[in-house]
Image (cartoon, rainbow, N blue to C red):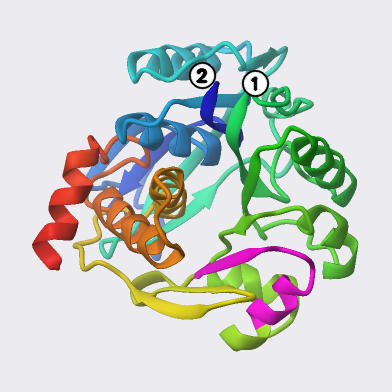
Amino acid sequence: MWDVMCVGIGCLDVLVRGADVTTPFQGEAKNCEQVALAVGGDAVNQAVALRHLGVNAGLMTGLGTDEAGALILEQLKHKGVPTEDIVRSPGNSRVNIILVQNDGQRHFIHEAVPAPGSLFTPVPPAPGAARIISIGSLLAPPFLTPETIERFTAAAAESGALLCADVMCNGRLYPLEELKAGLSRLDYFFPNYEEASLLTGQRDLESITSALLDCGIKHVVVKTGRDGCFARSRREQFFVPAVPARALDTTGAGDNFAAGFLCALLEGKSLFDCCRFAAATAALSISQMGASSRVISREQVDALLKKIS
């Protein structure tokens, strides 16, 4: 039985730090501070972080049959992530070029059309096979349409697992009413502020979370970057500040936040304590380059929380 089955994107990240993208090229080349390769993608980042936190996490993602797919698969095995639920399809895998600024913020360059290898039909675990099913990102491969989201969440709910999701709103955005059937089955939802605002058409956190709760979502946790997060259910609401950290690369911070939250949730912690543990996990995740290599152990997160308490 899986504690968490992570479903969503697996990709190869090419991280470029310190490149001046505001000026034209002088000749054929432009210098930067660092170039690195790392496995990434929402589901991969969550699965790796969860395994490092001691959680029995599985991974369901799509990879191509190209060299990038082979490299991702090899690295996942090296990191201890089970690979039996990975679907490999003819074609290329997803590759992101990530331009990392000196303050840790980043910009992505990727193909306008999803890579063939990232498109697969996700099948939820059988009833009783997972305690939590975590969708890496709604509105991203393979959950690109309201129909796909509704089919998967309906089947996932039948499995008896808690259902959690993040969202990615950098492509086509559907009206909230069209997404309501799929959203209604979510137990926990982790959008960032910009995504939540785009989804709901609201600007303040009270109105944003009200609109999402009205869709039937049981718990909404809106990530607000350096400020922390705002959590709300029908019974409680509160703000949890971020854990201070020097940001070298914020790629995957939200995925690591979700992993920390799910780890605490499995232990029966309160909503507040889940957010606190998630914030510490995210803080650790931005301290190095790459989204899936920084959170090393549960003890690491516990030590950070103890240090700041």
Name the residue type under label 2: Ala
Compare residues 80 and 62 and report the one nearer the observer. Answer: 80
Q: Residue at x 54, y 47 (%)?
A: 109
Numbered tag placed on residue 204 in the rendering: none
Please state if 261 lies on the left or on the right of 119 as rendered.
left
Does the segment drawn in magenta span residue 309?
no
Alpha carbon distance from label 2 to label 1: 8 Å
Q: Secondary structure at mark 2?
A: helix
Please state the extent of the stretch shown in magenta in the rendering: 208-222
Q: Is residue 74 above or below residue 25?
A: above
Which x, y percent locates residue 215?
A: 79, 68
Which x, y percent locates residue 110?
A: 59, 43
Mark 2 vs 1, N-terminal side: 2
Mark 1 packing: few (<14 Cα in 10 Å), some, or many (20+)? some
The reply to whether callout 2 and callout 1 are in contact (CB within 8 Å) is yes
Does the rendering let one see residue 259?
A: yes
| Quadrant placement of the N terminus | top right
Q: Is residue 83 above or below residue 175?
A: above
Which quarter of the picture shows residue 181? bottom right
Name the residue type under label 1: Asn
| Quadrant placement of the C terminus | bottom left
Please state if 101 lies on the left or on the right of 220 as rendered.
left
Does the rendering let one see residue 21?
A: no
Return the residue at label 2. 68
Mark 2 packing: few (<14 Cα in 10 Å), some, or many (20+)? some
Q: Residue at x 56, y 74 (%)?
A: 232
Q: Secondary structure at mark 1?
A: loop
Which x, y percent locates residue 209?
A: 64, 77
Numbered tag placed on residue 92 in the rendering: 1
Compare residues 190 and 302 and report the one nearer the observer. Answer: 302
Q: Residue at x 67, y 86 (%)?
A: 207
Please state if 24 lies on the left or on the right of 276 as rendered.
right
